[in-house]
Amino acid sequence: MLTMLMYHRILPQEHPEAVSAPMFQRQLDYLQEHYQFLTPEKALDYICGKLGDASRPYAALSFDDGWLDNWLFATEILKARGLRATLAMSAGYLHDGAVRRTESDEILNLRMAEAQRRATSGDLRPYVNISELKAMRDSGVWRIEAHGTRHVKGSLGVSALAMPQDGESSGAFREMLKEDIGGCCGKLEAITGDRPQMFFWPWGHYTAEALDTVSEMGLLQFTVAKGTIHAGDGRKVLPRLGVSPRWKKFRKNCFVFRHPLLAAVHDMFHTERVCFDGFRGDCK
């Protein structure tokens, strides 16, 4: 059984939308005690049925979007422990620039919504640039995978990559999706030298039509719904376990989802809204 952990941001101090560096260290201590870590490549092998189960459940690390703090703070922590992680990079945030060793507190501490709003105006400083993405690859810590190009929500508050927007036809939507994700994969391959094999849906949003389109592209797909993955898992979209910056919640989630019976009970009473088939705009 594999738990794919989902992080976004690691900052030196507490922040409402990030895991602090001291808490990250504490969480890694816990994970290394209770799980056997898989590298991104071994996680792929496990998902594809090329690796069997072990005496302890497996864990793998993933980070979404491409926040600068992943480079500035998470890289050093992971490297010191000999751990590796997957970075789901939103190619639309990439920009030119030199490798930074620091950044202003104002930029580092922006809330996600504000950073995304500024990105639409061209201020991409909260995210890694092309030079930094290369440095992350060269560090030996990170495997770079696809998170799409447009990290925006459409008029109904659902990811623009998940479903047709504003009267868009099914055919036009599929072509847009292939262009967006294919462009992301191409750009990342040009930077890192490696073709992405995984796609992480922004906000975890998807529809059956979107899943089918990306399946045709040969990419393994991940959402944000809580759950675990089994060897040779044949589902079109796979779950992850979002990491809380609060210690008790983090430990509780890990405990529940490494015990299949507890996980099954959880699923009976909790459902994350990630699939938007039949969405009409009046659903929450």
Image: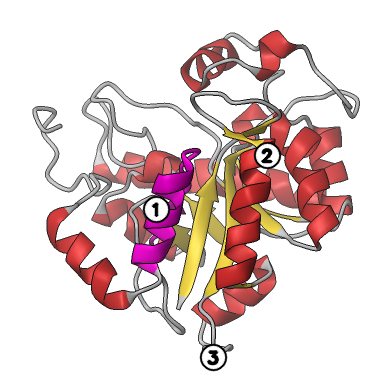
Q: Earlier in the sequence, mark 2 or mark 3?
A: 2
* Rendered location of residue 223, percent (x, y): 39, 53
Q: Is residue 92 above or below residue 104?
A: below
Q: Position of residue 111 (x, y in %)?
A: 52, 17
> Which residue is located at x 64 percent, y 28 percent?
93
> Can you tell which mark lies on residue 22?
2
Q: Which mark is residue 223?
A: 1
Q: Is residue 145 visible?
A: no
User: Looking at the picture, does residue 158 appear above or below residue 125?
Assistant: below
Camera-side residue: 16 or 110? 16
At x 74% / y 31%, what residue is drawn?
A: 128
Relative image position of residue 266 (x, y in whole percent): 22, 61
Name the kind of residue labelled 2 in the image: Pro
Query: Residue at horizontal 32%, vertical 25%?
Result: 154
In the rendered structure, which amino acid carries the disc numbered 3?
A: Gly
Return the mark for residue 52: 3
- For label 1, the SS is loop
Write down the region rendered in magenta. Answer: 238-257
Label 2 or label 3, whichever lies nearer to me, is: 2
Q: CA distance from mark 1 to mark 3?
A: 23 Å
Q: Is residue 243 magenta?
A: yes
Q: Quadrant of residue 72?
A: top right
Q: In front: 263, or 280?
A: 263
Find the distance from the CA under tag 2 to the CA under tag 1: 27 Å
Left or right of residue 115, residue 158 in this image? left
